[in-house]
Image (cartoon, helix red, strand yellow):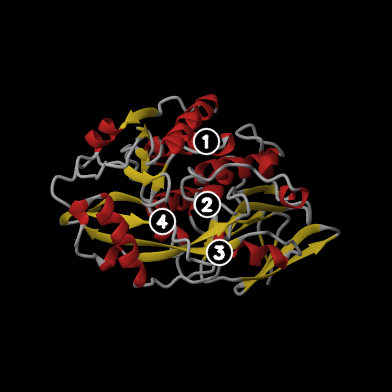
Amino acid sequence: MTETADVVIVGGGIVGASIAYHLTSDGCRDVLIVERAAQQGTGSTGRATGGVRAQFETDINVRMSLHSIDFFARFREEIGRECGYRAVGYLFFATSDELLARLDANRERQRAAGLRNVRLLTREEVGEMLPQMRLEDVRGGVFCPTDGLIDPPAVMRGLTEAATEHGARVWTDARVTSIETEDGRVASVETSRGRVSTRVVVNAAGAWAGEVARLAGLELPIVPLRRQLVGVEGFAGMSESMPMVIDAASGFHFRRVEREGRTAAVLLAWPDPAETPGFREEFDDRFVAKVSALASARVPSLAGAAVDRSLCRAGLYEMTPDRHAVLGEAPAPRGLFLACGFSGHGVMHAPATGRITSDLIMRGRTELVDVEQLGVERFAAGRLIEAEHALL
């Protein structure tokens, strides 16, 4: 027997959940989320650092972040559940005058896009925010107090529950095996749980978005790339309000993480340049020594810190050539909408993505951003979104 749905969302992580929530809030109640795993949130959503920031180098990412952070700030009011948002801020520090000048120039771009509370810091002010940090080579930094942290699985659960309360359904342990078309338009989706007749499919499949797109005859320049996190024991004097701290040159970053019934730990991350594209989700123990060396060099108090294996994990980024998302309706087949390619920013941009995608499906347009900038056509046309990647 063939099921029917007005919209089928492929991917049940935080992005798919946000799209389902926004669609049902806009009156589209016959929404089906199809999740390949046995339960939601076992992919990138459950392995994310949980950071949310508006400090980007491009207008479109700043605008998506501003909308999303505002949504997280009023999550309990709108959704009736907790999302764990804490405005501890993001601190980017620079180890050269050239990089500090770029960070300062970014503030002007961010201000023009609506982000007006980023402060330029001296080396001494950076030290006041984190006294345990080694500062000899630090020239200064920038800080945004409304950047912060969320609990990604809690956000996903809250959005899913709110969507299902308004009629949405969720299929777990269901793989999409084909997307069928008629006269150039989506007609149905075949899954391991059966066939679903639908006129609209949303590809929110994260690192697997390229594979899903190929089922509809569309090639997406999205590749999976492993990113790893290491948890270590916290250090003496670590403030409860410690921000996310990022080396703007190397991308090494760390933050405080709470542990129930135990003292807080520190979560370490670094975009290891030795990583190559591929579906590798296993944690590599050799990464511990790499990132721990960076941590102890920057925060001597972390030298020799015991590793908390329960916090160590690996997940997949979904990378595009310009490290920006792919959003909007595909040129073909009609009825295929894309919400993927976030290149590490899917969690923090999930609310904006849900708003934009619902706008496009329900009204054919959105006022939140110039979504044409994020269309898949930009890659073939050579219209990549330019940025120097320090804040990507």
Disc nearer the start of the sequence (2/4)? 2
Disc nearer the start of the sequence (1/2)? 2
Mark-to-mark CA distance, 2 and 4: 13 Å
Q: Indicate the quadrant where residue 208 lies.
A: bottom right
Mark-to-mark CA distance, 1 and 4: 20 Å
Under mark 2, the amino acid is: Val
Element type where label 2 sits in the image: helix
Disc 1 vs disc 4: Cβ atoms closer than 8 Å?
no
Mark-to-mark CA distance, 4 and 3: 15 Å
Residue occupied by mark 4: 48
Disc nearer the start of the sequence (2/3)? 2
- Say whether residue 370 is left or right of residue 262: right
- Say whether residue 310 is left or right of residue 327: left
Mark on residue 224? Answer: 3
Element type where label 1 sits in the image: helix
Disc nearer the start of the sequence (4/3)? 4
Residue mark closest to the camera, 2 vs 3: 3
Mark-to-mark CA distance, 3 and 1: 24 Å
- Please tell me which residue lies in front, 285 or 67: 285
Residue 271 higher or lower than 287, as above or below? above
Residue occupied by mark 2: 15
Structural crowding at the residue carrying mark 2, measured as other residues with C-alpha within 10 Å and reported as few (<14), some (14–19) or many (≥20): many
User: Which residue sits at x=33%, y=61%?
Assistant: 291
Q: Position of residue 13 (x, y in %)?
A: 49, 57
Under mark 3, the amino acid is: Pro
Residue occupied by mark 1: 62
Could you tell me which quadrant the N terminus lies in? bottom right
Residue 110 higher or lower than 75, as above or below? above
Under mark 1, the amino acid is: Val
Q: Position of residue 296 (x, y in %)?
A: 25, 56
